[in-house]
Image (cartoon, rainbow, N blue to C red):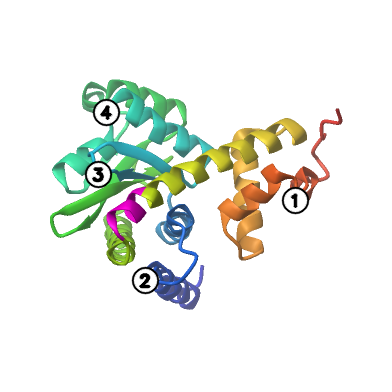
Amino acid sequence: MAQWERDERLARAFLELADTLTQGFYLIDFLHVLTDHMLELLDVSAIGVILVDARGQMLDVTASTHTAHQLEEAQIEFDEGPSKDCCYRRDQVGPVDLNEPATAERWPRFTKAARTAQFATVAALPLRLRDEVIGAVNVFHSQPTGLHPASLRLGQALADAATIGILHQRLSQDQAERIGQLQIALNSRIIIEQAKGALTAHLRIAPEVAFERLRAHARSNQTSLTRVCQHLVEGRLAATTFATPQDRPHHP
């Protein structure tokens, strides 16, 4: 990416992360915008986002890849990993080398799952405004030295901008609306998983590939991922829309 392109993308990222007070704000789509910008600007392998609800429980909200999604879910299931430590400490965790014995001692099950997924290092950046932490962003890389300090500083700046955007949006809501927003995000996750499963079955492709095609379609049509998945699940968008000549669609 040329420097002028990077500068333009960076300016667009901060502008979009500040634009949360418009009608039709959907938390999960906003966080997809964050992961898209981070993935391109930080030059990393994958991004995952976890939010913390009013009871302090972690919720797996979104990720840039199917594999990263699985690792976010694993952290919640195993009750260990960089996201939990990041939210508890209210500070950045890592970068951590996943091949170090100390990491396996610290997070035994998460480390095994992350290494199986071919990741070599991970960091967690807090979604934080002063003392309030609303979640964490996990940054994964396939190379042991792939997470550079400058990239993580930029990643934290983007995470800070996203946090401010989310909190500003919450200020315009009452308590019931804020709780409902998280529920809508979880419902959107279900719709995305259903759409991913439908593509996987119909086109006989891997879930990772299905997820990337859904994201690519949303980006190219300048629409939200949730809307694309909803239309696919409801039958308003055909699975063949996402097919390539190499696919072998299933014909019932």
- Pointer 3: what residue? 54
Across and down, in percent, residue 183 comes to 41, 45
Counting residues from the start of the chain, the first of labels 1 and 3 encountered is 3
Check residue 80 in the rendering and tell me which mark sits there, or answer none. 4
**Neighbour tally class for label 3: few under 14, some 14-19, many 20 plus, Cα within 10 Å:** few
Query: Marks 2/1: CA distance?
Result: 32 Å
Query: Marks 1/3: CA distance?
Result: 36 Å
Counting residues from the start of the chain, the first of labels 2 and 3 encountered is 2
What secondary structure is found at the residue carrying circle 2?
A: helix
**Neighbour tally class for label 1: few under 14, some 14-19, many 20 plus, Cα within 10 Å:** few
Which secondary structure dominates the residues rendered in magenta? helix
Counting residues from the start of the chain, the first of labels 2 and 4 encountered is 2
Is residue 177 inside the magenta stretch? yes
Closer to us: 158 or 41: 158
Across and down, in percent, residue 157 comes to 28, 63
Check residue 18 in the rendering and tell me which mark sits there, or answer none. 2
Callout 1–callout 3 Cβ contact below 8 Å: no
Counting residues from the start of the chain, the first of labels 3 and 4 encountered is 3
Is residue 213 inside the magenta stretch? no
